[in-house]
Amino acid sequence: MSKTSRIERANAIRALAMDAVELAQSGHPGAPMGLADLAEVLWREHLSINPMNPHWENRDRVVLSNGHASMLLYAVLHLVGYDVSIDDIKRFRQLHSKTPGHPEFRLTPGIETTTGPLGQGLANAVGMAIAERQLAQTFNTSTHTIVDHRTWVIVGDGCLMEGISHEAASLAGTLELSKLVAIYDNNGISIDGKTSGWFTEDVAARFVSYGWHVIPEVDGHDPNAIQNALDIATSSSCDQPTLIDLKTTIGYGAPTKAGSEATHGAPLGSEEVQATRENLGWCEEPFRIPPAIADAWNQCARGSALESSWNDDFASYAKAYPQLAEEYQRRINGALPSDLDNSLSQHLESLTQTTKATATRKASGACLDVIGPVLPELIGGSADLTGSNNTEWQGAGKLNNGGRYINFGVREFAMTAIGNGIALHGGFIPYTGTFLVFMEYARNAVRLSALMELQHIFVYTHDSVGLGEDGPTHQPVEQLTNLRTTPNFSVWRPCDGVETLCAWRFALRRSSGPTALILTRQNTMPQTRTNDQVDSINRGGYILKPESHTLQLVLIATGSEVSLAVEASKELESSGVGTRVVSLPSTDQFLVQDQSYQEHVIPSEIRARIAIEAAHPDYWRKFVGLDGKVIGIDRFGVSAPGEVALNHMGIHAQAIIDAAQELLVDTTSISHANTK
């Protein structure tokens, strides 16, 4: 086998990147070309991976936070031996290809997270590093180290300009995540040009202030300097995450465009591509990698040996610690513990007997007291609202002391993306908490959680103007509609303790996407139900209070407004109006039920329908139709005690009764007109 040089191997990445972007006539060639030398050293000499098994649990995690540089990953994945073919490279950015414009988790083998919205990959990596450390503390012993891998994240100038990078890096330093290594692609270029006009802070000093170990001013085109920096990062005994400040030239090798924004987000152009080939001494046709270079890159044999050695270690571990090994496999495979259902069922039984009004946020906290001790993979916390969100169960313990509760601080965006990273790593079910209105701070990470189909439980409390005196800045109006219209996102707004427990049970069983629990600050009255009604809660909606007379009117409500609907229905029934109350804690789950069940709960023949929810009314038109009414809130709230605010905004039983009386007259007139 003929020998190849490091520059030749790095140039293979540069060639594939510029060829793929040129063929697609779309993409970002500059960063992959600038980072090629780093990739050659990192993937060939430092990473513990197995391209033959992208899901090997003890692999190093690599995150490309500046996801527009996706051709760096695709080129490397192809070269080291993942199931990414040269034809996949040729189909860069094309429909149904393995090589989309930005890396997508679950789509391409070897991709650890979906990136593109800048900065979130860094926060994902923080979550992965948290998960690795917690698993290591739980399962490693004095004689066996079965959890032993690193998290690497490549970040660009744009990532570090985004506010989430400050949040995530600050917390990572505080948590002393020593197996987290961030590599800063410091090329000084973003879309608008040289960043010296808008990004002049001392990044190294900034990270030092966060408590990171910083390796400054590494020449990103000197393989020996890169090798030395990576050696220091992996051998350091300090309890700190590491930042490598890598000085690179964007579009390295392009004779007229290197070092400029011209290489950032557009093809180089055929003339520049040819000139780059000549400048780099790369004489191959587009998409052709010489066999000697391909062989030098391939990591399949090395990766298989690494995993095989780990499998031998795990077999020895399983003999020495059979219970730990069994629990480790259960956690990694995502199976819930056998005693969880029993604990939930016992708690449910006690809830069906209670008559005491309580806020659903407190009911959620009581659920966590039951769930936490029997679900060791549950890990999470709150954005400095622990006492308000009721997110810490008894005995959870603090993260830095080996516990499972994370005080995220006032960092909603980073908290959410870190939770996503924990879910991506595996072995945990993360949950995160804040006020519903402050979901807006984290909105894009919430969206990515749904896009990546992650099991991440969002605890959003203080769900309406009913939170009261804090006023309109804290009172959500449009957020429920925002979440409900997000694909693959399940939203639950329970009305009492029983529905809250059912929502938690659903979220713990749902492994194909995130679930939000929307919870009240104010107390809600427990509802009386039959066993069949309790069983129907998991279908998202059910008949809570059947009509006593011939059905004329359907009231549909969620959360704290369910009790208002029940109150109004009693008054209407007393005047002879057959009124049904439907509790609809999860509209998305109700809408995936078979049509016969939906028709059973909300008959289409009954046109007199009223939806009641202290949130924006537009979403509810799909349930009540144009003939029905929605009692909701389409303006910002007020600062007043909760009940006063709700009454002022028209959320009360009399408003339901008045709307019903008006609606019944209107629908009767319509019905008569249609029969003439």
Image (cartoon, grey):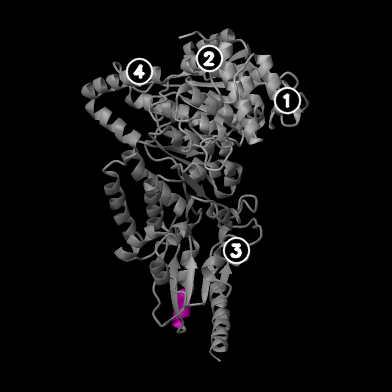
For the N terminus, the image quarter is top left
Identify whether 646 is placed above or below 120.
Answer: below
Residue placed most toward the observer, 372 or 300: 300
Query: Mark 1 sits on what residue?
Result: 271
Chain-order first, disc 3 or disc 4: 4
Look at the image and say whether residue 570 sits in the magenta stretch.
yes
Identify the main secondary structure in magenta. Answer: helix
- The residue at which mark 3 appears reads as 618
| Residue at left offset 71%, top offset 29% | 269
Which amino acid, mark 1? Glu
Residue 546 belongs to the span the image colors magenta: no
Q: Can I make out residue 574 in this image? A: yes
Determine the CA span between mark 2 and mark 3. 55 Å
Dot 2 corresponds to which residue? 41
The C terminus is located in which quarter?
bottom right
Amino acid bearing label 2: Val
Name which residue type carries label 4.
Answer: Ala
Per the rendered image, the range of residues in magenta is: 569-574
Q: Residue at x 65, y 31 (%)?
A: 22
Element type where label 2 sits in the image:
helix
User: What distance separates the C-alpha of mark 1 from that of mark 3?
Assistant: 54 Å
